[in-house]
Amino acid sequence: MKGKIGLVVGLGVGYVLGTRAGRDRYEQIKTQWLKVWNQEPVQEQVEKVKDFVGDKAAAIPGAVWNGVQKVVKSASGNGTAGQRLDSAVAAGRKAAEDVVDATEDAVEEAKGEASKPAQKPAAKKPASSSTSAKTGS
C-alpha cells in the first residue's frame, strides 16, 4: 500500500512541477534528450540491443509452439479420458517450464551483454613510409 501511495504522490508532484516549468522548459528538455539520443554511440548501442533481443526473442515462440504440440499429442493419445487429461496437464506444465527457461536464459544473456563494457573502435595507426626501409628497398 505504501508503494501505491508513494507512486500517486510522486506522479502528483511531477505533474505540479511540470506544469509550473511550462512548455518552454519541456521543449528544452526534449531538445537535449534528442541530441543525446541521436548521437552515433547511442544509436550503435540501440541497434545492438535490437539485434540481440530479436535473436533471443525468436527462441520463445518456438518453445511455446513445441509445448502446444506436446499438449495436443498428450490429449489425443491412448488411455482413458482421465489418463489423457493427466498427460496433457503434465505436458502443459513441462511446456510452461520450458518457456520460462527460454525466457530466463534470454534475460540472463541480455544482462551479461549489458554488463560488458562498450567496445571502443581500435585507433587507426598512421601509415608510415619507414616500412619500405625495413624491407631493404
Image (cartoon, rainbow, N blue to C red):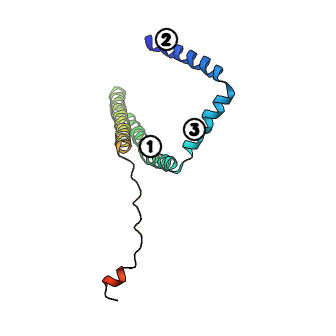
Q: Label 2, label 1: how many angstroms apart (C-alpha)?
A: 35 Å
Q: Which residue is mark 3?
A: 33
The label nearer to you, 3 versus 1, is 3
Q: Position of residue 23 (x, y in %)?
A: 68, 27
The disc placed on residue 5 is: 2
The disc placed on residue 122 is: none
Q: Is residue 62 above or below residue 82?
A: below
What amino acid is found at the position of numbered circle 3 in the picture?
Trp
The answer to the question of whether label 2 and label 3 lie on touching residues, with beta carbons closer than 8 A, is no
Q: Which residue is mark 1?
A: 57
Kindly state the secondary structure of the residue where label 3 is placed: helix
Residue at image point 44% right, 11% down: 2
Residue 32 location, quadrant: top right
Q: Position of residue 15 (x, y in %)?
A: 60, 19
Q: Position of residue 62 (x, y in %)?
A: 42, 44
What amino acid is found at the position of numbered circle 1 in the picture?
Ala
Kindly state the secondary structure of the residue where label 1 is placed: helix
What amino acid is found at the position of numbered circle 2 in the picture?
Ile
Q: Is residue 39 left or right of residue 88?
A: right
The label nearer to you, 2 versus 1, is 2
